[in-house]
């Protein structure tokens, strides 16, 4: 992936080809930094139609990701029974790139 600094971001796809895991440590397949932190996932707005529904990430969906994560975490704090059987992978931040010539639909 091209980066904002003009270089490239080395990444590998996960189970969904729209989700990439940035590689740290020289592209050797390791996803963790020296401090043991996981690299943030990159979700690409690639429009896919595998069924009758076309899937893509709109700017509104990107904006709502962190809001929905916070709401779900609040519910889990109030409802311990749900928290025992549900784990929420929190969206800590979300960014939408508005680039001329790129369509997200």
Image (cartoon, rainbow, N blue to C red):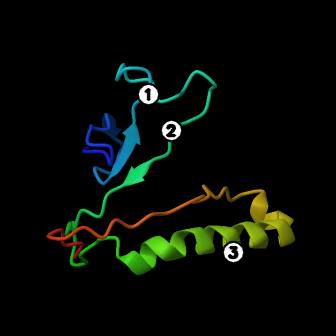
Q: Position of residue 17 (x, y in %)?
A: 28, 50
Q: Residue 12: which numbered mark, if any?
A: none
Classify 103 as above or below 27.
below
- Secondary structure of the residue carrying tag 2 is loop
- How far apart are labels 2 and 1 at the CA level? 7 Å
Point out the image quarter for the C terminus: bottom left
Q: Is residue 47 left or right of residue 21?
A: left
* Residue at the (27%, 37%) spot, across then down: 7
Q: Residue 71: which numbered mark, if any?
A: 3
List the residue tagged with mark 1. Answer: 24
Q: Position of residue 3 (x, y in %)?
A: 31, 45
Point out the tag, 2 or 1, that comes first from the N-terminus: 1
Determine which quarter of the picture holds residue 85.
Answer: bottom right
* Residue at the (35%, 76%) spot, across then down: 58
What is the residue that sits farthest to the left in this orientation? 101
List the residue tagged with mark 2. Answer: 39
Q: Are marks 2 and 1 in contact (CB under 8 Å)?
A: yes
- How far apart are labels 1 and 3 at the CA level? 31 Å
Q: Position of residue 14 (x, y in %)?
A: 36, 43
Q: Is residue 69 left or right of residue 17?
A: right
Crowding around mark 2 (Cα neighbors within 10 Å: few <14, some 14 to 19, many 20+) is: some
Point out the tag, 1 or 3, that comes first from the N-terminus: 1
């Amino acid at each position: 992936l091209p980066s904002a600094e003009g270089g490239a971001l080395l990444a590998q796809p996960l189970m969904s080809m729209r989700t990439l895991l940035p590689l740290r440590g020289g592209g050797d397949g390791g996803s963790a930094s020296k401090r043991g932190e996981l690299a943030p996932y990159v979700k690409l707005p690639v429009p896919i139609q595998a069924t009758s529904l076309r899937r893509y990430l709109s700017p509104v969906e990107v904006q709502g990701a962190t809001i929905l994560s916070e709401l779900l975490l609040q519910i889990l704090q109030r409802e311990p029974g749900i928290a025992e059987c549900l784990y929420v992978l929190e969206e800590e931040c979300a960014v939408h790139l508005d680039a001329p010539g790129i369509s997200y639909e």
